Structures are given as C-alpha cells and as structure tokens.
C-alpha cells in the first residue's frame, strides 16, 4: 500500500491589517469561515496556507516574499498557480491569493513553532507576519532494526526482525509492513500480517526473505516501512551482502586440479619432448 | 549448361560439403527454432503470470489489470538478433574464400582459361550463395511457421504471413549484402584469413560499435534532462544519434524488422505497404552498400591483378 | 638466453609486424579514445548542468535540492567493456591463431622443434609473449582512460577510483587472455589453420552473443518495454508471489549465462566501474572478493585450455603439417 499523502488545505487567514498611511500592502482575510491564526501540521506531510495579498497603492508594485529561519528539516516556499515563486507583481488595487507550503519532516521534535513571513515591496516598504503551528501528534509511527548489515549466500533465506513503536497519541490499527526488496527476491511469512498498537506500545515484526539462487554477488538494500491509512513510519534500509556459494570454488578448483594431475601423468607416460 | 548455372551449382554443392559451414547453418537453424520455443514459452509464462495476477486481484477485490498486448509475430522477434549476428557471419563465411580460396588452390587460373566471361563467375557465385541463403531462410520460415502454430495454437492470418514473408526477403537482402561485400574483399585480398577477419571487423562495427556510439549521443540528451529535474524517463533520439545510425545497415534492418514482426505496438496492425513507406530510407540504406559492392566486384574481376 | 625467453621475444616482434594485428589494435585504441573522451565529456556536462540547476533553485529560494546525479567518472569506461568484448577478443584470437599457424606455414615450426627446446616450453613462450603484448595494450589504454577522465571530465577522482580502474583493465587483460589461449589451443588441435580460426570465431560468437542472448530472452521482465510486471501495474509484493512459480526457469536461465566468460567479464567490470549499484562503499579489492566467481569464470577456462593445449601439442606427430 502506498503512502497516502494528505495535503491539508487549511485556509489560514490573517486578520492582521497593515495600515500604512501613505501607501499600503494589505494582507487580508478572505471571506472564508473557520479563520484561524494557528494550524496543525502532521509529521511527513505538507501543509498549505493561503495568504491574500492586495496592492492598495495607485501604481503597480513587485513584492518579494521570504520566510525567516525555519527549524531543521522543515522546508517552506511560496507558490502561485502551481509554480514556486519568490516574488509577485500586482497592479494597482489588484488582489491575489498566494499559497504558502510547509514540508514537515517525518522525525521532528518541534511541537509548537511560529514562522515569520516577510513581504517587501519594491520600494522597500516591509511587512512581517507570523504563522503559528502546532504539531499533530495523534498519529505517529516509528520502526527500527538492530541489524547493521547481513551476510547471505545465493539461494539462502534470511530472517528479519523489525521493531515498531506507536509514538503518537492515538491507537493505530491495521498496520502492515511494506517491504521493498531487490528484484526477484521473495518476501514470505510476514508475521503478524496486521497489527494494532496503542499509544506508546511496541511490537515486533518477523519476516523471511529468500534470495534467488541466480542472483549476483553484491550488496543489496532491503527497504522497509510500516503504514496504515493514517500514517506512514520512517523507512529503514538493511544492507544484505550476498556472496556466491564457496562450493563453486571447490568444484572449479577440483576440476583444474584433476586436469593438472592428469597432464603431469600424461607427460610422465609419454615423456617430455 | 548455362555457365552461370554451372558456377551456382558448384557453389551450392561445395558449401554443403564444408563441415564448418554446416555447423554454422545448424547453429542458425537451432537458434531460430530455440527462439520460437523460448519466445512462445515466455509468452505462455506471461499469460500464466497474468492469470495468477487476475486470481490474486479477484481474491483481494482489487481492480483487474488489462491483459498484456501479445502480438502473435512478436513471438518470433528474437530471430531478428540471430539474423543480424549469425546470419551475417554465415554470409561472410560463405563469401570469404569465394575468390581467395580459388586463387590459393590454383583453380581460378583454370577457370579463367575456360570459355567463361569473368562477370559470369561473379554472377554464378552470387546465384549459388543466393540459393544457399534462400534455402536456409525458407527452411527457417517453414520451421518457424510450423513451430509457431504448434506452440501457440494460432494460425497466422494473411497479413501476418505477408509480414513474415517480407521480413524473410529483407533478411535475404541483408545477408546477401554481407556476402557481396565479402566477395569483393575476397577478390582484393590474397590471404583468405585476412579477408575473413577484415569482414569480421566490418561486421563488428556495423552491428555493435556504430549503434553504441549512436546510443551515447542519445543518452547525452537524457542526462541533461534528469539533472535539471525535468521528467524525461526515456532516452530520446537526437539528430546526431539518428545520423550515426544511418551508417549501420544492421540498425536499419532491426528497425524495419521490429515493425514487421509486431515488436513495436504502434505499428503492429499497420499494413505492410505503410510499413515499407515509413521505412523507405532504411531500405535504401541496406540496399546501397549492396549495389556499390556489386558494381565494384564486377569491375575488379575484369582487372589483370585478380589472378 | 633461455629458449623460452627467445620464443617470447620473437613472438612480440612477429606480432608487431602482423598487419591485421596492427589494424585491429589501431581500431581498438581509436575507439577507446573516442568512447572515453565522449564519456568524460558527458560527465563534465552533467556536473556543470547540475551546478547550474542548484544555482537556479537557490535563486528561487528553495532550501532543499535534488540529489546530485551519479557523477561516476569511472563510468566513462563503460563502452570499453563492449569494445574489449568485441575487438579485444578478436585481437586476442588473431594473435593466438597466428602465433601457431604462421610457424606451420612458414616451416619454422619444424626448425624450432628440431632445436633443444621442449614443446611445452615453446608453447609457454608463445602464450607468455602474447600475454605481455596484451598486457601492454591494456596498460596503454588504461593510461589513456585515466588521463582523459582527469583532464576532460573535471569530476573528482580518488585513489580508490584509480585502483578500481586499473583492476578493471586487469580483468580486461584476463578476458583477452582467455581468447588468446583458445586461439592457440584450436590452432594446435586443428591441422588446418583457417579452419581453426573459423571455429575460434564461432566459439566466440556462441560465448559472447548467443549464450547471453538466450539468458536475456528467458528473462521475462525483458520481454516488454518498461518490464512485464510494471506493465501489469504490479508492485513488488505481487511480483514476488508470481516469480515464486518460476524458480526452475530462473535457475536454467542463470546456468546458461554462467557458461559465458563474456557475462563474467561484464559483471566484474560493471561492479568495479560502479556502473552496477551497490559497490560504491567497497574498496576495489573488496569488490573483487565479492565477485570472486566472475574472476574465476575468467581464469579457470584459460587454465583448462592451456593444460589441454600442452597435452595436444605434446602428442601430435603431425603438428607441423597443414
């Protein structure tokens, strides 16, 4: 099951009105209910805020948009009509709605934060506003494994144990393991098939992966994550060092050895000339 | 008996007495039979895999994917590779000692003392080689049709038979182009082995080196796209790669054959005439060296130093 | 001077006078230069293009950037694998066949064998002399490649990369040695020199093209563009359940591929050149230890053929007749 990405389109409306006596940048609330100055973000997902910008001046202006310092792992950018922008030009009295996207990393310790946004007009007129966030920790999941790397031979099966923890505030049901093995590797006996975890509860997945006998020697990663309809965990990668069975070496060396002995005996019998 | 017919008959008999040549012919036949078997087995495996997928989807209650498009003639498509590889080498093998062998054995002088025109020798050898290659391809065609019917249970319709026949004619022309080039080299070189190896080098260039050089130009465009984060998943042709490919009759042969044998789904149900029309430049690319070497051979055999 | 050394010296001198050898060698060097220059230039353009993209994205205010493409400078040698497989093998076959056949035709084989030299010593001299030539050729091409990569591509190249490159050229040398020994063995076994050459070429065709082609044909996922399973909209989990039914088919397919030294050369070559993913963190020697079966697949047939050539050459009474 693929990770479901839900984009929250929470309309965040700022009721802050900037009043500059001579000329104005107006960032205003649009006529949409459920206005809030604070909105939720979910780990691993992208949140969309909307800013309505109005040029109240009598001439056209270009406005540069920027964000202040974001916490580590977060990424914020402005978008207009689906294109990433860092400035917008408005004619006199023109309004426009700009989207502000914020990408939230899967693992973050930030619970509450306030992001400053800055809008600078081409003549230097500046306005700042803050956007507040609260992390929604209802659904959060983490997986881990003690295995640093594995060694195996072609044709072998390996057993993996994956630890899983519900790090959110709500129950998680129908959790299933998503295993992405290398091409032609077979994943079998994932136990349990589905899992339910209460907040703070741990469990263990066990699974068997079979390496094809025709596989080449090398290092291959098995990528694993866990998911249900509400959340997807972090992804872990377990490298498996596959080598060829040493039996082949003995067979080939044996054949060469036999042939060498035969050659020596042949020379002894017929005489070296 | 007509002089040309005499030479042709001699070429035909001599070829089939040569054990090495017979080994190559057997290899070609075996590979084409194997390709039909492998192709149909793989297609059967795909259909079986599809049935497994359908059962799985039905048990999970999810949507059933559409069946893969399996075009009948595509089962025979591996033969394109075998004609390009083994067929070309077979033609080279037929032609490499056509003249240099006669010269080394002393039979060329003997032939030229008889009341034959020199061009009749060339024509006779061409006819003989044409009969050998034609016989081989006809047997391959019949084998493939028979195996195809047995393996798949399908009987090809008229359009499919026409496509297959045209493919065989093209394969004939392709192999004859190598024979004619080798015949010319055999006329010019004194050493049989040298002539053979020169043609092997030419074959390597036409079949592998030129297509790979063209490929590097194709990949070049692709790399630029992926780095600037625009989506271009499939390497695209560039003007340079197309020009380079024109130098290789092997690539042109593969392109036309892929259209004829329904490897390319977009032309799988086009008429034979529209395929020919689409690939007219490729056909000219295959025919042109053939005609050039033929003319050179006829002019070279008239010279004194051919002895 | 030791008789073997005399034979070695003669072998090298004769090869350098062989017109065909010089033609093939010239083509191989030319192709190497062209492919390496093109490949290095491609790496340079990718690097420049990536840096430009980063600057552009920075100007848009983005703080996260796409990962750098795999600017593997060693990959500029990728085409060389194919050229060695074709021209390098042909060169080695020509050398091997000519080293015995020319002696027979010119009558010098009778003369040499009437001297105080054992037949096996004579054969050793032939093989070693030609191996020295092949080693020199691969060494020169490795230097050309290294210089082109460093000068043209401007991509960073570490000492580990240099070791990998030289080991790759060592594998190329082992691959060509197999065909050299094959050429010599068949020239010794078959009285007719031309026939021996033709059979050598046929074996090369089977090993280098037909066996890998059969392996590719039998791989179901190669039969449709984009892969059979992805065209079905199947994900990995479902693919695996289906593949489970075709284990024997897969084992047979792999067995056929294993019989081809060309496949072994390609596998170890791609691992050393980082063209096959998964070996980036390993040192060059670690790569060889992981891919030992492929190295053995190059060495073992050469050793076996060499021993067989000894036995045939020792016993044949009519060895100097054609």
Image: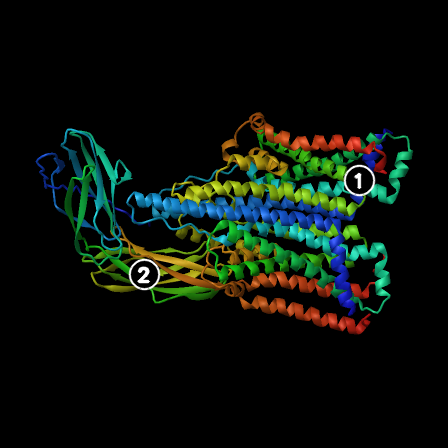
The residue under label 2 is A192
In percent of the image, x 73 and y 33: which residue is there? B293
- Which colour style is shown? rainbow
x, y (%) of residue A67? 21, 47
Q: Label 2: few (<14), some or many (≥20) within 10 Å? A: some
Q: Is residue B15 left or right of residue A139?
A: right
Q: Tell which tag, 1 or 2, sits nearer the viewer.
A: 1
Residue A184 versus residue A35 in the image, above or below: below
Pointers 1 and 2 within a single chain = no
Q: Quadrant of residue B152?
A: top right
Q: Is residue C157 left or right of residue A26?
A: right
x, y (%) of residue B221? 47, 40
Please state which of residues B30 and C78 is positioned toward the viewer in this rendering.
C78
The residue under label 1 is B98
Please state which of residues C146 and B191 is positioned toward the viewer in this rendering.
C146
Q: Label 1: few (<14), some or many (≥20) within 10 Å? A: many
In percent of the image, x 49 and y 44: which residue is there? B47
Question: Furthest residue to the front?
Answer: A123
x, y (%) of residue B193? 77, 47
Q: Quadrant of residue B273?
A: top right
x, y (%) of residue C119? 80, 66
Residue at mark 1 to residue at mark 2: CA–CA distance: 73 Å
In percent of the image, x 79 and y 68: which residue is there? C3
Q: Secondary structure at mark 1?
A: loop
Q: Which mark is residue C180?
A: none
Chain letter behind tag 1:
B
Residue B186 versus residue C28 in the image, above or below: above
Residue B21 versus residue A94 in the image, above or below: below
Chain letter behind tag 2:
A
Residue C257 appears in the picture as rendered: no
């Amino acid at each position: 099951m693929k990770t479901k990405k839900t984009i929250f389109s929470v309309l965040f409306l700022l009721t802050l009105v900037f009043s500059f006596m001579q000329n104005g940048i107006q960032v205003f609330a649009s006529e949409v209910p459920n206005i809030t100055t604070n909105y939720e973000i979910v780990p691993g997902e992208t949140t969309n805020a909307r800013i309505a910008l109005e040029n109240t001046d009598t001439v056209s202006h270009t406005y540069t948009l920027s964000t202040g310092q974001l916490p580590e792992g977060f990424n914020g950018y402005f978008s207009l009509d689906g294109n990433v922008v860092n400035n917008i030009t408005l004619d006199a009295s023109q309004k426009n709605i700009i989207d502000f996207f914020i990408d939230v990393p899967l693992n973050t310790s930030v619970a509450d934060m306030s992001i400053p946004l800055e809008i600078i007009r081409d003549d230097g007129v500046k306005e700042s506003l803050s956007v507040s966030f609260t992390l929604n920790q209802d659904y959060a999941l983490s997986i881990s494994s003690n295995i640093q790397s594995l060694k195996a031979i072609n044709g072998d099966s390996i057993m993996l144990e994956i630890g899983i923890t519900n790090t959110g505030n709500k129950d998680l049901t129908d959790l299933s393991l998503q295993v992405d093995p290398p091409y032609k590797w077979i994943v079998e006996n994932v136990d349990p098939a589905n899992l339910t975890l209460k907040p703070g509860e741990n469990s263990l997945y066990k699974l068997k992966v079979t390496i094809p006998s025709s596989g080449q020697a090398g290092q291959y990663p098995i990528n694993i994550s866990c998911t249900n309809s509400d959340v997807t965990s972090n992804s872990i990668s377990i490298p498996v060092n596959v080598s060829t069975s040493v039996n082949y070496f003995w067979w080939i060396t044996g054949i060469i050895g036999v042939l060498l002995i035969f050659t020596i005996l042949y020379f002894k019998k017929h005489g070296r000339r | 008996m007509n002089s040309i017919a005499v030479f042709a008959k001699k070429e035909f008999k001599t070829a089939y007495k040569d054990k090495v040549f017979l080994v190559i012919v057997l290899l070609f036949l075996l590979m084409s039979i194997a390709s039909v078997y492998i192709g149909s087995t793989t297609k059967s495996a795909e259909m079986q895999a599809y049935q497994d997928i359908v059962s799985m989807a039905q048990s999970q209650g999810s949507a059933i994917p559409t069946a893969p498009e399996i075009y009948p003639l595509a089962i025979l498509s591996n033969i394109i590779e075998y004609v390009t590889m083994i067929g070309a080498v077979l033609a080279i093998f037929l032609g490499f000692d056509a003249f240099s062998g006669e010269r080394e054995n002393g039979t060329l002088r003997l032939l030229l003392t008889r009341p034959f025109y020199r061009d009749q020798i060339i024509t006779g050898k061409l006819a003989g080689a044409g009969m050998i290659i034609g016989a081989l391809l006809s047997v391959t065609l019949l084998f493939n049709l028979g195996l195809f019917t047995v393996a798949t249970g399908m009987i090809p319709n008229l359009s499919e038979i026409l496509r297959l026949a045209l493919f065989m004619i093209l394969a004939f022309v392709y192999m004859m182009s190598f024979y004619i080039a080798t015949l010319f080299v055999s006329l010019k070189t004194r050493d049989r082995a040298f002539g053979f190896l020169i043609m092997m080098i030419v074959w390597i260039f036409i079949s592998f080196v030129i297509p790979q050089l063209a490929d590097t130009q194709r990949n070049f465009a692709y790399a630029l796209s992926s780095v600037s984060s625009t989506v271009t998943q499939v390497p695209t042709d560039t003007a340079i790669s197309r020009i380079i490919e024109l130098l290789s009759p092997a690539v042109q042969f593969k392109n036309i054959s892929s259209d004829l044998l329904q490897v390319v789904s977009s032309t799988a149900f086009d008429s034979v005439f529209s395929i020919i029309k689409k690939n007219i430049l490729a056909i000219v690319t295959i025919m042109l060296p053939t005609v050039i070497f033929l003319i050179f051979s006829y002019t070279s055999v008239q010279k004194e130093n051919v002895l | 001077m030791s008789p073997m050394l005399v034979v070695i010296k003669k072998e090298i001198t004769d090869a350098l006078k062989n017109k065909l050898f010089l033609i093939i060698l010239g083509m191989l060097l030319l192709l190497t230069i062209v492919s390496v220059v093109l490949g290095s230039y491609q790496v340079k353009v990718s690097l420049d293009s990536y840096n430009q993209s980063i600057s552009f994205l920075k100007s848009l205010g983005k703080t996260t950037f796409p990962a750098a493409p795999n600017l593997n400078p060693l990959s500029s040698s990728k085409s060389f694998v194919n050229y060695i497989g074709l021209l390098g093998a042909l060169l080695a076959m020509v050398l091997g066949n000519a080293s015995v056949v020319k002696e027979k035709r010119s009558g010098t084989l009778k003369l040499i064998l009437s001297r105080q030299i054992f037949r096996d010593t004579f054969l050793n001299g032939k093989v070693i002399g030609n191996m020295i030539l092949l080693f020199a050729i691969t060494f020169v091409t490795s230097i050309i490649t290294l210089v082109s990569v460093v000068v043209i591509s401007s991509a960073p190249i570490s000492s580990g990369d240099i070791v990998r490159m030289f080991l790759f050229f060592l594998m190329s040398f082992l691959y060509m040695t197999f065909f050299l020994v094959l050429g010599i063995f068949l020239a010794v076994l078959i009285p007719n020199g031309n026939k021996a050459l033709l059979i050598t070429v046929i074996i090369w065709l089977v090993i280098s093209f037909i066996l890998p082609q059969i392996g590719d044909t039998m791989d179901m996922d190669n039969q449709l563009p984009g892969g059979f399973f992805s065209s079905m909209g199947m994900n990995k989990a479902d693919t695996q359940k289906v593949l489970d039914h075709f284990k024997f088919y897969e084992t047979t397919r792999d067995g056929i591929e294993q019989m081809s030294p060309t496949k072994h050369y390609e596998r170890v070559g791609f691992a050393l050149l980082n063209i096959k993913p998964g070996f980036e963190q390993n040192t060059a020697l670690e790569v060889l230890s992981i891919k030992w079966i492929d190295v053995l697949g190059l060495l073992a047939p050469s050793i076996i053929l060499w021993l067989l050539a000894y036995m045939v050459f020792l016993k044949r009474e009519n060895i100097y007749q054609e």
